[in-house]
Amino acid sequence: MTRVYADFAARKAIELLEEDSPTGFTKKATAWVKKEFETLGYATRTSNKGAVLVDFGGVDSPEGALLFEAHADTLGAIVAEIKGNGRLRVSKIGGLCAANVETENVTVYTRVGDEYEGTFQLCNPSLHVNKDSASQERTFDSIEVVIDENVSSAEEVRALGIEVGDFVCPCPRAHITESGFIKSRFLDDKLSVAILLGFAKFVKEENIRLPRHVYALMTTYEEVGHGGAVILPKDVTEAISVDMGCVGNGLRCTEHQCSICVKDSGGPYDYDVTTKLIEGAKKEEADYVTDVYPYYGSDVEATLGAGNDIRHGLIGSGVYASHGYERSHIDGVYATMKTIKGYLGV
Ligand SMILES: [Zn+2]
């Protein structure tokens, strides 16, 4: 497999990152996913709760079908209160960190289809006025959204059509550097959706004969824990989450590698699937490491939790500063795609 497909995946990731999709508000992203896979010639199906299933085709095999899972939902926030001063208090969606989004631009989406710009700011943020601003604890009570409209009361905010329950989406700031680094919020897990799209393009353009039935599922509730809890096609015997690889102290993975997770908060991954992932990476000379993730749960564990009797695995491109302003690299994307290729033996 040439690196062209990894470059394609990285470019497509940037497109998808522009489609705001916090958990509970994912329709723009899933419409993009459907359109992109269908453009490549694949059939898709959307589940009741919005997950997109893509059929890669392949022959019936005694080992059963293989499902790849990636999630199209991201962290974000929802308006919890319109304050008397016209600012917004938010409730976080997933593990969004208040300190991390301070000063980030946001888009507020109203239920009637309007969009407003704003910024996450500390309450009373001017350093020339608030001498304690640097040392104050950052929480979603001390950080608020300042809307970029002439509003200074709750009534004026409501007159814009903004109400409790509207979604607040931090700007992803997606960017690929000359040196191949991919920088953005929410690489977790849109980078993996794009990796599966890149692999789909490889299969189509190189007329790859898949030795077993293969599906890809793009889920929409991973960041709150039940994305992978869906009804699977009957022939699926194995599922592999393609999600961000952890990078940090005590772990080996870098942004340039494919991380094969052997254990996370949900326990060890299936021994045979993990071994076959390692063998597949070796066969394709993909740059990979195995790691244990200390604080991590995956979609495929939700799939198991939903009662599906399957074998499971987890791989992904290394992502630095996860759930913050994240960074990966096209090298890691390429290594992950080669690991998928090696696993399938194509
Ligand atoms: Zn994720």
Image (cartoon, helix red, strand yellow):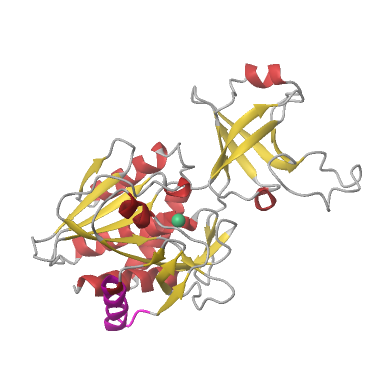
Between 263 and 194, which is closer to the camera in this rendering?
263
Residue found at x 52% / y 76%: 251
Most frequent secondary structure within the magenta stretch: helix
Q: Is 328 a magenta residue? A: no
One can see residue 254 in this view: yes
In the rendering, at what x and y percent does residue 104 appear? 66, 47
Task: Give the side of residue 65 with respect to residue 218, left or right.
Answer: left
Task: Give the side of residue 21 with respect to residue 58, left or right.
Answer: right
Q: Is 282 a magenta residue? A: yes
User: Which quarter holds ligand 1?
Assistant: bottom left
Between 17 and 230, which is closer to the camera in this rendering?
230
In the rendering, at what x and y percent does residue 319 appear? 50, 66
Q: Image height check: is 305 above or below 114?
A: below
Residue found at x 12% / y 60%: 58
In the rendering, at what x and y percent does residue 31 appear? 34, 40
Residue found at x 32% / y 43%: 51
In the rendering, at what x and y percent does residue 215 appear? 22, 55
Tell me which segment is drawn in magenta.
272-286
- Res 162 → quadrant: top right
One can see residue 1 in this view: no
Residue found at x 41% / y 60%: 243
- Res 211 → quadrant: bottom left
The image quadrant where one finds the C terminus is: bottom left
- Res 195 → quadrant: bottom left
The image quadrant where one finds the N terminus is: bottom left
